[in-house]
Image (cartoon, grey):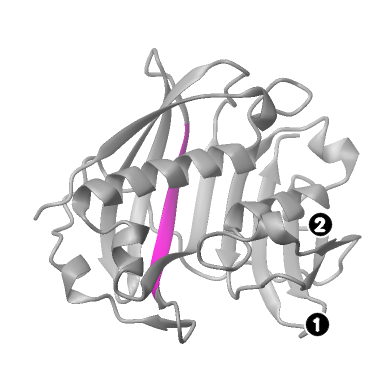
Amino acid sequence: MKSYPGTSQFTVRSSEIDYHGKATMPALVSYMQEAAWANTRDLGISMYDLLERGLTWVLQRMRVEMFRYPKHGESITIETWASGRERVFLHRDFRIYTSDKELLGQATSAWLVMDVVKRQMVSVPDFIMEVEVVPGQEPLPFAKGKLPQLQEPKYKEQMPVRWHDIDLNRHVTNTRYLQWILDTVPLEIIDQKQLLELDIIFKAESILGDTIISEAGMGASESILLHRLTSQETGKELVQAKTLWDR
């Protein structure tokens, strides 16, 4: 079977906006994941298809670029397609449009396959490899390479992992990680500036009962923040990210 692009429509709901009336980044990432789920379902390789085999999809990295955030009640279309393979990584791209085909944002992502019992990453199984990757559009540059390390944290918060933070894979959902990263950004930045770019790497899982330490500090310029989430119990780094804000 050849892969093919998928499209999904969403309307920005009141529970998904900030107090400026615009969709939040976690909401938009959630839309993109729903669009990816629908496209993989049509290809026979959705998370449910994998779970029947004791496997699951795990998001390893995502890079998002936003040009304009949709407002409450605005209808958007997300196009998504498998954009390539690289060793054990499967790449998927997204573009977000208005009903008038205005490009609001775009993203590229890298996914792994995990054994749900052993909690270990595995080689891409044959039934996924049999789906031929045929990008619907010119692929975006793969999200890869190292991010700068956070050396001097300036902002810090603690977040306990609770029941509603856990997803179908029985670990913290990645949109909650993203929310915790943004919750640590000081008000004078998150309120007065727009998040233009996000690059986030998911390095390890956390489960119910953990406590997460979210830290942030300045990057190479005033418009860049570096982020880190770690487990208070193990000291393990869970997430690393970089955000770019307008001036």
Question: What label does residue 233 carry, if any?
Answer: 1
Residue 36 in sight from this viewpoint: yes
Looking at the image, which residue is at 17% across and 69% down? Answer: 127
> Is 107 positioned to the left or the right of 43 in the image?
right
Q: Amino acid at mark 2?
A: Met
Question: What label does residue 218 carry, if any?
Answer: 2
| Inter-mark Cα distance, 1 to 2 | 26 Å
Name the element at disc 1.
loop
Q: Main secondary structure of the magenta part?
A: strand
| Residue 223 position in % (x across, y down) | 75, 45
Name the element at disc 2.
strand
Looking at the image, which residue is at 40% across and 36% down? Answer: 95
> Is 51 positioned to the left or the right of 182 in the image?
left
Q: Amino acid at mark 1?
A: Glu
> Is 246 positioned to the left or the right of 40 in the image?
right
Looking at the image, which residue is at 50% across and 55% down? Answer: 62
> Is 46 positioned to the left or the right of 190 in the image?
left
Near-viewer residue (76 or 154): 76
Quarter of the rendering occupied by the C terminus: top right
Question: What label does residue 121 carry, if any?
Answer: none
- Which residues lie in the magenta part? 105-113
| Residue 86 position in % (x across, y down) | 30, 70
| Residue 167 position in % (x across, y down) | 57, 59
Looking at the image, which residue is at 74% across and 66% down? Answer: 228
Q: Residues within 10 Å of mark 1 (few under 14, many from 20)?
A: few
